[in-house]
Image (cartoon, helix red, strand yellow):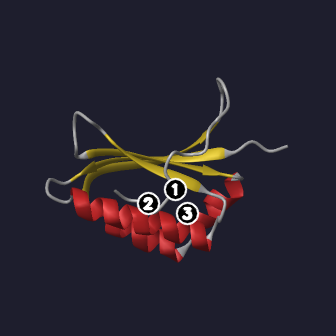
Amino acid sequence: MRMSVFSSGEWKVKAGREDGFVRAWNDFAESSRKGIEPDVWALLLRDKKDPRHFRSIARWREEEAIARWQGSEDFRRRTAELREMVEQSDISVFDIVVSVGSVPEPLMSVGQRD
């Protein structure tokens, strides 16, 4: 049985671009879910101490789906759009090494906003 893999992004958004970044990231996540991996879930987290610092986390069923996602024209276009709004960014792929308790589904679904 394959274990899920996770992609994670670290984002330092330019001052004043935070709301646009959140909208663009949400559109990107929805597009990825519809076009590449319908079972993916994703979260965008904002640092309570630094409202310009974000972290994104997505769970994928398989690493091949991440490769398809990163190889898509939509990925290239949307990451370019996001990068126009940030000072720094880094996207990585992770395997689970340790899991304590059960890994819950996210508290919010992709696309849900306040």
Q: Is residue 19 above or below residue 93?
A: below
Judged left or right of residue 7, residue 9 is: left
Quadrant hosting residue 112:
bottom left
Location of residue 99 with respect to 74 vertically, above or below: above
Q: Nearer the viewer, residue 32 or 80?
A: 32
The residue at the point 54 percent across, 46 percent down is: 106
Can you give x and y, in whole percent of width and height, for residue 74 in the image? 49, 74
Q: Amino acid type of disc 2?
A: Gln
Tell me what residue is drawn at x 60 percent, y 49 percent: 59
Q: Does the CB distance between marks 1 and 2 fall below 8 Å?
A: yes
Badge 1: few (under 14), some or many (20 or more) residues near its Cα, within 10 Å? Answer: few
- What distance separates the C-alpha of mark 1 from that of mark 3? 22 Å
Sequence-wise first label, 1 or 3: 3
Q: CA distance from mark 1 to mark 2?
A: 6 Å
Query: For the point 65% across and 65% down, which residue is it?
Result: 38
The residue pinned by badge 3 equals 70
Q: Which residue is depicted at the point 42% across and 74% down?
A: 77
Q: Is residue 85 visible?
A: no
Q: Residues within 10 Å of mark 3 (few under 14, many from 20)?
A: some
**Front-lying residue, 65 or 111:** 111
According to the picture, the residue beneath numbered tag 2 turns out to be 112
CA distance separating discs 2 and 3 = 24 Å
Per the rendering, the mark at residue 109 is 1
Residue 30 x, y percent position in the rendering: 50, 67
Secondary structure at numbered mark 2: loop
